[in-house]
Amino acid sequence: MQNKESFSDEELAIRTQQGGTADFEELAKRYWPRLHRFLLTYGNDAFASDITQETLLRAYQKISYYHSKKSFAPWVFTIARNLALNSLKRSKRKAEVTMDENLTESNQVIENDHEIGMVWGKAKQFLSKTAYGSLRLHYGEELTVKEVAIIMGKSEIAIKVILHRSRKKLAEYFKSNPIKL
């Protein structure tokens, strides 16, 4: 019997569709930290944890809708994004969370490396939610532009423009405000 860690995400999803509960547990283990980091775009640590849990539950319940010919990551990140947006609408909260509280949490949770955490924190502070989310997915989670476009509900060209403008904006900021360790 093969070790579950040797299976791709897509293989585990297919095995889950065939009744492999333990296979989904491996997917949940792989995706919990990635989803949580992404969901910090929309709220604080507690919000991200709640929606991450809800995302994994929903993904398990709806695994029959996953198309085995497609990548698993965009499918599950789209569920996460939709649940986050729906939760924010339902609670009639604004998507903007106080920056002080959120930056402190994101620097502690997003990355262990202090310098990278500061870069992500500044990105979150200066960029729109869409721009930050796109950067986070593409560079932080290493998803392709196509996968980011699917998750964010935009065209690939729009994502490329968003990524370019975001990189340019951050480069200008850090050129005049170098990171102090």
Image (cartoon, rainbow, N blue to C red):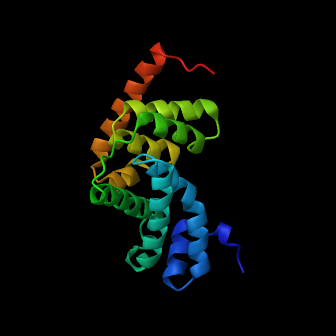
Q: For residue 59, what is the image quadrant?
A: bottom left
Residue 2 percent across, percent down from the top left: 70, 76
* In the image, residue 177 above or below residue 59: above
| Residue 5 pos. (x, y %) | 67, 67
Residue 133 image position (x, y, % from top left): 40, 45
Q: Can residue 128 be seen from the camera position used here?
A: yes
Depth order, front residue of 110/78: 110
Q: Nearer the viewer, residue 132 or 9?
A: 132
- Residue at the limit of the structure toward the top, as seen here: 176
**How many marks do you count on the picture?**
0
Could you tell me residue 102's position as x and y percent? 47, 40
Judge whether residue 8 can be spotted in this image. Answer: no
Q: Is residue 169 left or right of residue 25?
A: left
| 77 to 41, vertically: above or below | below
Residue 110, compared with residue 74, is above or below; it is above
> Measuring 49% from the left and 54% from the top, which residue is drawn there?
46
- The residue sitting at 47% across, 61% down in the picture is 50
The quadrant of the rendering that contains the C terminus is: top right
Q: Is residue 72 left or right of residue 31?
A: left
- Camera-side residue of 70 and 176: 176
**Residue at the image point whose x is 54% and y is 30% from the top:** 118
Q: What quarter of the picture does the N terminus occupy?
A: bottom right
